[in-house]
Amino acid sequence: MKKVPSYILLLMLIISTHYLPISFAQDYTRWVLPRGVKARFGKGYVNDIQYSQDSSLFAVATSIGIWIYDANTFQELTLLTDYSSGPDNVFGADSISFSPDGQTLASATSGDIYLWDIPNKRWKLRMGRGKISSGSSKIAFSMNGKTLVYADLEGIKLWNEAIDGGLTSERMFYRDAEHSIDINSISFSPDGNILATGNQDGTIHLWDKVKRKHLKTLTGHTAVVTSISFSPDGKTLASGSVDKTIRLWNAATGTHRKTLREHKKPIYSVSFSPDGKTLASGGDDKIVYLWDAEKGQHKQILMGNELWTNKVLFSPDGQSLAVVGHDHSIYLYDTATGVNKHINIEHALLANNVVFTPDGQTFAIVCRDNSIHLWDTATGIYIQTLTSQHFPNEQTGNINPYRNYSFSPDGSMFVGGNQDGSISVWNVNSAKHKFLIGHNDSVYSVAFSPDGRTLASGSKDKTIRLWDAATGKNKHTYTNQGLNSEQTGNTVAVCSVSFNPDSRLLASGSMDGSIKIWDLETGNTKQILTGHTQKIIDLTFSPDGSVLASVSTDGTLSLWDVTTGAHMRTLGARKGTIWSVSFTPDGVPFAGEINDNVIFLWQVEKGTRKKILIGQGASVSHVSFSPDGRTLASTSADGTVLLWNITSTTNATQ
């Protein structure tokens, strides 16, 4: 056997290291999950980011916890979260700060302060439990690590001297009743003696930390001060504001030195480079400026970020600038060249919907950033992303976020209705895309027939179109007459379409709350079902085709006898809204109800709530059942999608 040269072995090692299997990168989807959740997709929306002083770690405070990354590889290391008060209690962080030695991370949220033991990946001290703040909280270590400052609507507190890994000597720095300040940002001077606060009223306050004395009030901004930053030498304080300006101040005297005015929209973040020569700023105008801090002139513009900027932060070595976009992704730029380093850390999944393949093995997360992400349901492995020139209606307030997407029965095609009346069709295997043209207004609903031969679409143009799934040709067009159409001649928009199991019938739900069952062999209406008072958002046939379930924005779910058209049962949510319905393979109908960040599961025939699912960090926006009724997907404002196991009796509150 011929010996392999050592340089080839080295090359193979490098390749294997840099091109790890996707499954390895997605292990975090199963970290620290709420009770009953099988997997989490998305890491939560971003509130704050921080580097450790030695540049080895990168921390991200999110709506579901604190993610710690290796700052060189940006591989996830751990998720810090607190389930000590119960597995359904979601922990999020507003603000974070590393101690100078990198061993401790402080976090603040809703009146709570945590100190995290970074080497052991757990919290070691919790302070302020139960004192809930109605606004966001800010926290920061002094440069020597001996003082921790915490600010919220109640005031500023200091903790001094680290003892046995904790902080003692809590002192109230000031109370809100004394100064009436709503604080947006805080920063210590490098020597730790001066504390600056940027405030809601456009002022900046300087405080003597040692004497706990108010020193100066800096005025000049005409709107909220969103961000402040001391230069490394402590001589200059920079402030960014909603008034679209950056002001540079003499930190010792409080005198105004210069105003920077290039931004055309509100500024959300300013940050000095470690050498103090450069100031970075970002905001609503989708531009990140790098300024000469001494001359007050912008010397570079970082392009490539097409989103609002919520936060900018230099790495401790000054070579990189981290930028948090409005999509809650983190982008890294080379500060020397201004080029994106192509290390983009996606955090929040701003999802509108989840769609399962008919076999339940794959699901698609449809996001507001013009992307559709495909995942393996069993393993949580990412498969691919589908994109197109158009995007289904969610961005403009789609009337039916559930039925506007569909997989073909074999999972090879994915379709979505568009605002311009076209239908996007993707070949899942090749990711190739094409359009079906025919409707002349927004497509609200699409569905494949179970035999895979036909695609149905319902539209705002008040028609239903049937398409040949193989060729994309339009086969039939039905005009959707509204109730009492014989007298009024009115037609109504079609909000939802669904085929029965043998592909011979099509149910359509209308804007006026009426439902029609169409005989596709004759093209005639077989049944007209009335009872709902508002638009239909979900329609599903039972596995044997004998029962049709319908969900309406009037807050009710109804069961109908398909043969006779008779109404069988109506279920109304008590406090929340029913958004999705599914039949299990044995024909048992289950409904998903949303009430803020709580999901209720209903056994429809009995009219009883069977389970309560708790664990989403913010309001739930959508729920979708898998075809076998064993899994529920939920999308939330916290930037995550959860997959729930709803068949086990131990995974949810009964």
Image (cartoon, rainbow, N blue to C red):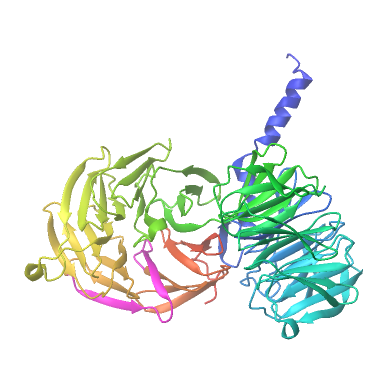
Q: Quadrant of residue 121?
A: bottom right
The mark tally for this picture is 0
Q: Quadrant of residue 40?
A: bottom right
Quarter of the figure with the N terminus: top right
Q: Residue at x 34, y 65 (%)?
A: 587
Residue 587 located within the stretch drawn in magenta: yes
Asked if residue 562 lies left or right of residue 121, the reply is left
Looking at this view, is 160 or 415 the one in front? 160
Residue situated furthest bottom in the rendering: 177
In the rendered view, tell whether residue 368 sits above or below residue 212: above
Place of residue 130 in the rendered image (x, y in percent of width and height, measured from the top left)? 71, 81
Q: Residue at x 80, y 54 (%)?
A: 52
Place of residue 445 in the rendered image (x, y in percent of width and height, measured from the top left)? 30, 56
Residue 310 located within the stretch drawn in magenta: no
Residue situated furthest top in the rendering: 2
Looking at this view, is 436 or 240 the one in front? 240
Place of residue 105 in the rendered image (x, y in percent of width and height, measured from the top left)? 79, 62
Asked if residue 164 lies left or right of residue 466, the reply is right
In the rendered view, tell whether residue 385 sits above or below residue 483: above
Place of residue 340 in the rendered image (x, y in percent of width and height, measured from the top left)? 64, 40
Asked if residue 494 lies left or right of residue 304, the reply is left
Q: Is residue 627 visible?
A: no
Span highlighted in magenta in the image: 565-588
Residue situated furthest left in the rendering: 487
In the rendered view, tell whether residue 303 sits above or below residue 575: above
Q: Is residue 348 visible?
A: yes
Q: Residue at x 32, y 75 (%)?
A: 554
In the rendered view, tell whether residue 82 sits above or below residue 299: below
